[in-house]
Amino acid sequence: MCAFRHNEGDHLSHENTIKKTKRFNHDKVMKYFLMAVASATVVIIFFIILFIFVNGASAIRDIGIWNFLTGFEWRPSTDTYGAMPLITGTALVTIGAIMFALPLGLGSAIFISEVAPKRLRNVLKPMCEVFAGIPSVVYGFFGMIFLIPLLRGFFPDHLLFGTSWLAGSIILGIMALPTIISVSEDAMRAVPRSYREASMAMGATKWETTRRVVVPAAISGIAAATILGIGRAIGETMAVMMVTGNTPIVPEPLWNIFEMLRTITATLALEMPEVVSGSVHYSALFLLALVLMVMVLAINYTAKMIIKRSRKKFGETISKKSLLDKVTEHEKVAKHTKMFSKMSILACLFAASFFISSMFVGAVISLIVAVLATMVFVSLMYTDKVAFKMGRSLMLTALFISAYMASSLFLDASASVLVSFIVVTAALISIPLAKRLLAKTKEKIAHFVLLSIVAVVLMILIVIVYDIVSKGLPALSLNFLFGYPEDGGLGGGIFPAIVGTIQLVVGTMMIAFPLGIISGIYLAEYSKDTRYTRIIREAIDILNGTPSVVFGLFGMAALVIYLGVGYALIAGCITLAFMVLPVIIRTTEEAILAVPKELREASLALGASKWETTTKVVIPAAFGGVVTGLILSLGRAAGETAPIMFTAAVVFRSSVSLSLLDPVMALPYHLFFLAWEVPGSETMQYGTALVLLLMVLFMFALASLVRHRYSKSIKW
Amino acid sequence: MDIVGFNLWYGEKQALFDVGMNVRKNKITALIGPSGCGKSTLIRCMNRMNDLIDGCRVEGSMFFQGQDIYGKDTDVMALRKRIGMIFQKPNPFPMSIRDNITYGPRIHGITKQSELDEIMERSLKQAALWDEVHDRLEQSALSLSGGQQQRLCIARTLSINPEVILMDEPTSALDPIATAKIEDLAISLEKDYTVVIVTHNMQQAARISDYTGFMYMGKMIEFDDTEKIFNKPSEDLTERYITGRFG
């Protein structure tokens, strides 16, 4: 038909039929192949739960679930297994962590999202991501070597050893920061610009807009961020084990933050290596893991529900019919969440002020101080409401009483009354003054507070990194990098640990990449919203929420013991691969979904099959995002300790072996071993921590470089 | 191409009602009508692009050279090779200009480099883009301007030598000068290809098409020679739309 040859062999000549041609259509076959691979996740999570449950079942029979959950004594030496102190330990240390992390995280998120100019934000966000990149064992090491002596210096009367609930909560709080910051920042940025403009157009200051429009609109996202932070803290093992002292008791009194305690995760990590397989103790540990799984899953599920609802709020796809119902429902949800978060903030505040003052003064006065602090806060919260009046009179009364009690410590009764009157009058005068503070001044104060919060967060990061780098650098030498450990870890090098970590990462990569990428492709391109797809997604979510120590437990029970592999590289790789699988699946899926559908249409309209379109157009276009996810997951695998400590890692290897069935040394486990069992090896510890940190942060930097380059070169 | 009694549903909602029309070989057929009238839906049915939408269901028949497009034994990929499509927004692949054009031929089994080069040059010349890009074929297609990108997409469709080219509002995202070039291109394609074009712009339909169909609320109100539709339409509704009294 044109200046184009079409002889018989020419594929482009028109056949006189549109019936099935010879060209093989891969689509059906590929679809089932991909689906089969994606089902691996379901199988994995099924086996994890199965193994934990089967192994834990005999403990239910021997101990009884009720005795197990409510018993106050955990003493394996006498076969007494009451998980109560461990459960309370986990709960307390997590609550403390959130009380520490929430103000810092939320303040930073508000600053980054609302206050910081774009350039500053582009610096701050990646810096907050560094927090997420530091391996758990490095946090634990930092806690042991830096934080604990520091705390002991602050509270010499209260802390005999320094290891305590307080130390655990601080370290866990730091670890929960990146989750809280990034999730709540995302929630605030998702608030439509028009909301802010509407508020500003009415003459509100930026701070008023933030406080009254942006934060309330993003409140469910912020709640979800908090819950996810809690989930992260509960499942944490190494760091918390290294700083809490690991005494299985309930603090006495319950709010004594200087008491040592022990979490579920720490118990698993401490006792698992020593336990006899098949004993009651062994089974009890699995039952404990089951309790932990249930706790974490419940928390993550709550967060998921909240995020789902908040997404709907700003979604465009609300049909008109149900719009009204949905709006009222959302308002209800928002109201409940708001009230809940207010109550929890108040509770936190009350508890915090009580704890702090109880360090210095007696219980009664601390109680008064706590009530007072809470009241001040309440009155600040309701400054413009009717409740304010009531709050004010209550507050004045409380102020009077506390002023009286405080001064009666030093003065006699009549003088105290006088002093309290003066205090109350001063307060009465100053309240309206404070109310009349100009909106602009308020904004300045608020921004200053936010800025100082960010400064504190950055300080923490800088102190951690600076401490490790400055003390680790002198340890680095050729002998350190390429030598074998000597004197039980006191000297020599860490060569086998470096090689072992690389072996673990490469092995993990070879198992997790194909599974993860194929599952991601299936979910993004081929799956429809069927029941089976939902099951796969649910399995991925569960796998994602599973604490790393549970993976270690599973690896030990299933691979090391049941299959009889023993401590081996392959067991560690499989365990780590299961752990990073959900991360890879998710990032792959997201990167593929970000490819505009126009490109798919263009390819299909040219007569390409779905499989050709996917492999030749969609995946190349999503390449940057996929690679970023892969590198991030490797960084995570390299830094993890708990999954390898019962499956692959040993404290010493005299040679480097390439066999899959030999155990290996690994950097994170080596660091844990040195810090935990080899006193006097500080230089070696710092050196190991630095090498590990550099390795992990290098991967994170690489990932963000890839992401940056691809986002620049491809614009849709 | 003959369309007879064609109905389409998106889930519960019916989007096309008993549509009938025929598309003549080597002519330009335009579809006009207000937004949401179903003209894009109809054109996307002609090479079964609507298969991609969940919950989409059709009834009635569409015949292409005597064979039912929606027949059971139709090979959709072979069909799309013969009935190509240009979309509203230019959608080049994020690859080089060369790879964009050779993508289709490669998919359909051509591997010889000389042959691919030949196809590329022919397609780009047909799409009146050769002179502008022949010295930078290795550059990313995304570096082209919007109008150039759309002509590249036309060249890409021409590369697999289809018989029918469907154009779904191909100029709605372009400026007037780029639009004029695409229109000229459409007219020049007429002698070798059959063109179906959906457009918002009535002048465009009047300028370039031989036949015009006017659609409203999912129904084909009137289908006739373009001359007749624009000068003395038989339906009152068509006249009101043409003269700008609604829509």
Image (tube, coloured by chain):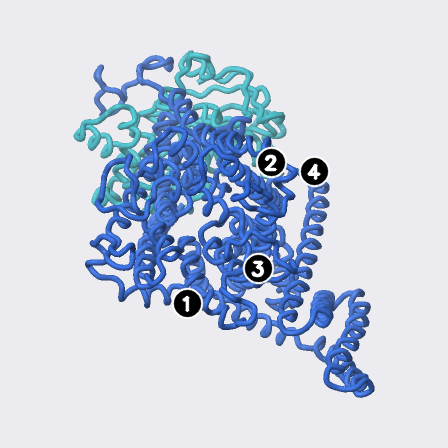
**Looking at the picture, how far across and down is residue B66, in whole percent?**
42, 11
**Of helix, strand and loop, which one carries label 3?**
helix
Label 3 sits on residue: A102
Q: Residues within 10 Å of mark 2 (few under 14, many from 20)?
A: some
Q: Colour of chain B?
A: cyan
Q: Do the residues at discs 2 and 3 belong to one chain? A: yes
- Residue lying farthest front? A78
Check chain identity for marks 3 and 4: say if they share one.
yes
The reply to whether label 3 and label 1 mark residues of one chain is: yes
Residue behind mark 4: A322
Q: Are marks 3 and 4 in contact (CB under 8 Å)?
A: no
Q: Earlier in the sequence, mark 4 or mark 1?
A: 4
Asked whether the beta carbons under mark 2 and mark 3 sit within 8 Å of each other, the answer is: no
> Nearer the observer, disc 2 or disc 1?
2
Residue B153 in picture, x, y percent from top left: 35, 36
**Residue pointed to by mark 2:** A63
